[in-house]
Amino acid sequence: MSYVRPNITFSDEVLKVSIAGINLEMIHAPGETDDQIVVWMPDKKVLIAADNFYKSFPNLYTIRGTSYRDVLAWVRSIDKMRLLKAEYLVPCHSRPIKGSDKIYETLTDYRDAIQFVHDQTVRGINAGLGPDELAEKVKLPRHLAEKPYLREYYGTVAWSVKNIYNGYLGWFGGNSTDLNPLTLKELAKRFSKLAGGDKELMEHARRAGKEQDHQWVLKLTDMLLQITPDMSEALELKATSLRALASHSGNANARNYYLSQADEAEGRLKLTQAKIDADLAHRIPLAAIFAGMSAKLNPEKSANIYKVAGFHFPDTKESFTVYVRRGVAVIEPRFPEKADIAITVNSNTWKEIAAKLANPALAFVKGDVKIEGGVMNAVNFLDLFRD
């Protein structure tokens, strides 16, 4: 499997094409991502909904982490879809819907649910409520909550509310207690002291487990594990409660996290870094590779380092400068006037080295990498970008 770059792009709102005699309209419709494209087949009144509609309350926020999803842009996109008056609606993740009136009503409910959550979150913000209070307060009205296409199988209202809050105001909820909070470890120690010690805190966690108060178990075991990260009984009890919560969750994302973290607590989940193949590595622009270097700089190793490295790629005629200045790496798309280290290499070789598909020492021995300024200086410089 590899990445195929698009060979047709468009910047207007609609791209009209005909493929094998079938007329298609590609409509830009931001939603779950900014580049969503819904496909309209005007001759057959078929609308392919991309990821803007599926049989669940929409994933306005994804717990795996992503950039902010503009919920009002999502609403506007569904309004575009409604106006087409499709006879057939084909979501990419659930069953098709047939019938113009049914489709129009379903899409109307869907966009109304998104706008309701947005508007009531903003209303709560204006009333001075914080993100946790809003997540507890904002609920879909019954006429929307009971619709089969708005059950919280994938996204949830509570997560969406917190994301909308963060999109407007950021992480701070207005409570000064949160400006400079106790560290998690310090908070855990004080929890333990209030309980009478670690043994007593563990006993509270056991009792909560017997009472099936699983969310409280997670909180208490988290405190214990801050103090003693490898405390086996706390890990086992946490895993048991995570599995219990998973068994009662109808939300696929929540269930996945509960079960995955239970496996992790039990030592059954070993995370490894994903690897890409050479073909995909070759397709990544050099500018993207160098842009990512600054966030890889080790601050301890580079705390007292001032170094300038120049990289030149003859095959693409590109050059880059990497300045390391006491914990900060500055990247510029040009070769430096004065460099401590100069590296000349073809782009694909460097991409394979960056993706850990090629050994840099072997590439140097083979003559694929040319270094000025000393091999060990170059090795030490690149080591600044490793943990």
Image: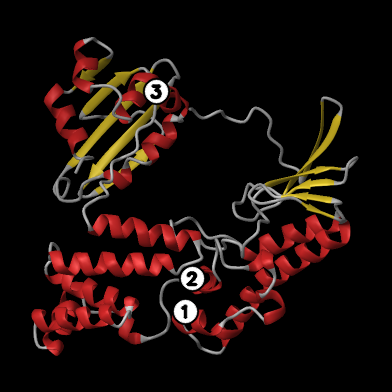
The furthest residue to the right = 43
From the viewer's perspective, is 136 left or right of 213?
A: right
Please state the total of marks drawn on the protein image. Answer: 3
In the rendering, which numbered label is found on residue 131?
Answer: 1
Residue toward you, 64 or 382: 64
- Amino acid type, mark 3: Ala
Camera-side mark, 2 or 3 = 3
Viewed as shown, does residue 3 lie left or right of 297?
right
The alpha-carbon separation of the residues under discs 2 and 3 comes to 38 Å
Which comes sooner in the sequence, label 1 or label 3? 1
CB of mark 1 within 8 Å of CB of mark 2? yes
The three-letter code of the residue at mark 1 reads Pro
Residue 214 in the image, given as x and y percentages of width and height: 33, 76
The residue shown at (57%, 81%) is 138
- In the displayed structure, 35 sits above or below 199; it is above
Residue type at the position of mark 2: Asn
Residue 173 numbered mark, or none: none
Left or right: 216 with respect to 82?
left
Quarter in which the C terminus is drawn: top left
Q: Earlier in the sequence, mark 2 or mark 3?
A: 2
Q: Which residue is mark 3?
A: 278
Location of mark 2 (residue) = 166
On the image, the x and y values in percent for residue 303 come to 15, 50
Q: Is residue 382 above or below residue 350?
A: below
* Cα distance between the residues tagged 1 and 3: 44 Å
Look at 61% across and 51% down and name the residue there. Answer: 34
Is the residue 213 above or below the residue 363 in the image?
below
